[in-house]
Image (tube, rainbow, N blue to C red):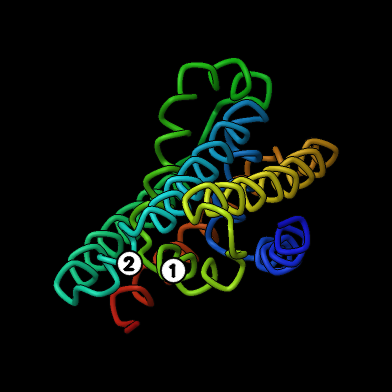
Amino acid sequence: MVRDLLSFAVVAGLLTIVPGLDTALVLRAAVRRGRRCAFATALGVGSGTLVWGVAAAAGVSALVTASELGYTALRVAGAMYLVWLGISMIRDGFRHSAATPETAEDHSREGLFGAWARGLGTNLLNPKVGVFYVAVLPQFLPEGVSPLVMGCALALVHNVEGMLWFAAIICAASRAKAWLSRDVVRRAMDSLTGMVVVGFGFKLATSHR
């Protein structure tokens, strides 16, 4: 069991550090809303990952991936959400913000739940996360161990690695706060992240299993 956990940790770790949508969302939150909202977004992403992992271990994700209609419905819903989210970010990027870095940090408390929900929704509406778990988890399920228990343990390992990676990104952004918090940089970050998110949405809409 320990060997399988360590082997999965290597695979999940490599997947975690590859730049993607989750990383872009957390970095954007760190730049625009401050450290608290960035960690809330990261927790939302981690919560979604944990839900997918537990669902895969319980066989729920297997049902989704086995059903063409279920997969397509989730894929279209996720794509629409990502496109809407990306357009909202691009729109924010063109707005002139008079908020200072300190003000953004002070008001971040008011949007902690929203930041968490954004991270959670982005992850849950991406069926490819479920496909990943359904495809990978069976390879790391040792004999004599409950698949549900082992699946939850593997999902937790992935979650912890993701949070450590996000924490490193948030701390790095905090060190460069003076430069990243400049209005022109923040608006550019919003626009760039928004385009990335819209791109992910279109990719998800046109992708197959």
Q: Residues within 10 Å of mark 1 (few under 14, many from 20)?
A: many
Is 156 situated left or right of 197 in this image? right
Above or below, 5 relative to 156: below
Residue 36: give x, y in percent of width and height. Answer: 63, 26
- The answer to whether any part of residue 48 appears in the image is yes
What numbered label is drawn on residue 63?
Answer: none
Number of residue marks: 2
Q: Which residue is mark 2?
A: 62
Q: Amino acid at mark 2?
A: Ala
Q: Quadrant of residue 2?
A: bottom right
Q: Residue at x 61, y 45 (%)?
A: 156
- The answer to whether any part of residue 188 appears in the image is no
Query: Which of 97/71 is in front?
Result: 71
Element assignment for label 1:
helix
Residue 106: give x, y in percent of width and height. Answer: 60, 15
Element assignment for label 2:
helix
Q: If the image is split into quadrants, where does the N terminus sit?
A: bottom right
Residue 129: give x, y in percent of width and height. Answer: 45, 63
Is 76 situated left or right of 46 in this image? left
Query: Which of 31/117 is in front?
Result: 117
Q: Amino acid at mark 1?
A: Val
Query: Which of 133/32 is in front?
Result: 133
Q: Residue at x 67, y 49 (%)?
A: 157
Q: Are marks 2 and 1 in contact (CB under 8 Å)?
A: yes
Q: Residue at x 53, y 17 (%)?
A: 109
Q: Which residue is mark 1?
A: 134
